[in-house]
Amino acid sequence: MSNIKYSLSDVVSEVSQMANIFKITEVLSLVLQILCIIGAVVMFIGGVVFLVYNDPEKLMIGEDRLINVCGMAVSTMALPADKAAQVMGVAMIISGFLYILLSMVFRNINLIVRTSNGETWFSKGATPFQDDNIRMVREIGIFLIFIYIIGLVGTMIVSLINENVETSTSMMVLFIGIIVICLSKIFEYGKELQDTEDGLI
């Protein structure tokens, strides 16, 4: 009997820890969403300033002329100040769009956790296997794929502006996006099993 009580207390402890992890994920995803929105605004404003400012020499302070956002890296260290400012302006505006897409990823993560806990108005109970969750998981994968595509197109655009710009794009975001879309099929299968079980009951 003592063994059964011990096992039940272990289960309660595990459930409690999982609840804490979900709460941390919910809060962290919301914070990261807000930070990404702030980052997007800063990038848009900074990009416009770099493009329209009359004296680019004042903007090019120090040797660090690198932008690296969501796998898109643009370095203008080999360029004179006026050319570097032009490239940096365009790269920052593109980075603003990347931050917007990333904020949508964190928004969906937050909504998935809250929907799974039955905390959103469109939630259908405390279960992860819901149509809205399947859609949002799939959207996360699509957002990540678009982050890669926009980053790739962005590096091409800045290379057209000046061929001496050093650029690179990480394919990791693309791979993660494809994996997440595949995971959405698991959620879809889980929902079908849950619907079948509910029908039998």
Image: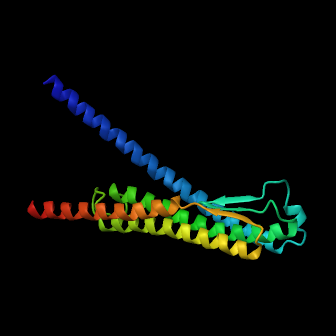
Q: Quadrant of residue 83?
A: bottom right
Q: Position of residue 117 (x, y in %)?
A: 33, 54
**Image-based side of 175 in relation to 68, left or right:** left
Q: Quadrant of residue 120?
A: bottom left
Q: Position of residue 66 (x, y in %)?
A: 73, 58
**Image-based side of 182 in relation to 29, left or right:** left
Q: Quadrant of the N terminus?
A: top left
90 over 29 or under it: above or below = below
Residue 122 in view in this figure: no
Q: Quadrant of residue 141?
A: bottom left
**Image-based side of 7 in relation to 43, left or right:** left
Number of marks in the rendered image = 0
Foreground pick, 187 / 106: 187
Residue 89 in view in this figure: yes
178 over 52 or under it: above or below = above
Residue at (28% x, 56% y) in the render: 127
Foreground pick, 186 / 52: 186
Q: Quadrant of the C terminus?
A: bottom left
68 over 135 or under it: above or below = above
Residue at (82% x, 61% y) in the render: 78
* Residue sticking out furthest to the top: 2
Residue at (46% x, 59% y) in the render: 176
